[in-house]
Amino acid sequence: MTIRLATADDLDAVIRARRDFNDEWHGHSEAEQAEFEAQLRAYLPGRIESGSLVVVLGEVGTHLASTAFLLVNEYPANCTIPHGRVGVLLNVYTYPAYRRQGLGAVVVAAAVAEGRRLGLDVIDLEATDMGRGLYEGAGFEVREYTPMRLSLT
């Protein structure tokens, strides 16, 4: 497998991977898909080029096999994030034909390495039951707090 960081030139592949990830977990109507894709086409290029979103691509031959997105956020510093730089790992996805071959671990390791290179203090994620072992194997720990959300839409 070849590992590389996406550029704006990879926009179609990145959108397809995000869409496929979301379809597998949530499913969407065609109208929702069109809105979703339009937002990504506006959002992704600037974020990828600025480095505020790192997308790791794992390719087998000419096929995209696995992805990991690392969103880079900045917050006021505190004792656990002394530089105020926090990564959020999301959209770790391996296409079904490539699962159980260790590809997810490889893209996660590449995202973590990029986080270190960028000087992040921590990387957070919300794990599914299916992914928990992968993340624990990469050194992620279950924290005391429970993620909570308030929907504004």
Image: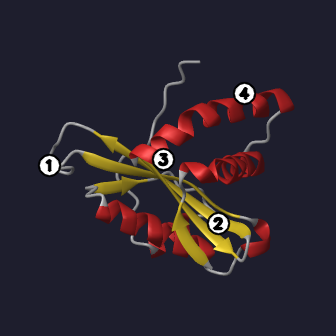
Q: Amino acid at mark 3?
A: Ile
What residue lies at 55% left-to-right and 72% top-to-bottom?
Answer: 3
In the rendered image, is residue 146 in sight?
A: no
- According to the picture, the residue beneath numbered tag 2 turns out to be 66
What residue lies at 59% left-to-right and 64% top-to-bottom?
Answer: 57
- According to the picture, the residue beneath numbered tag 4 turns out to be 35
Q: How far, Cα to Cα, is label 1 from label 3? A: 29 Å
Mark 4 residue crowding within 10 angstroms, few (<14) / some (14–19) / many (20+): few
Percent position (x, y) of residue 55? 52, 56
What residue lies at 56% left-to-right and 48% top-to-bottom?
Answer: 8
Camera-side mark, 4 or 3: 3
Camera-side mark, 3 or 2: 3
The kind of secondary structure element at disc 2 is: strand
- According to the picture, the residue beneath numbered tag 3 turns out to be 48
Depth check, front residue: 103 or 10: 10
Mark 2 residue crowding within 10 angstroms, few (<14) / some (14–19) / many (20+): many
* Count of all numbered marks drawn on residues in the image: 4
As drawn, the residue found furthest toward the front would be 9
Quadrant for the N terminus in the image: bottom right
Q: Amino acid at mark 2?
A: Ser
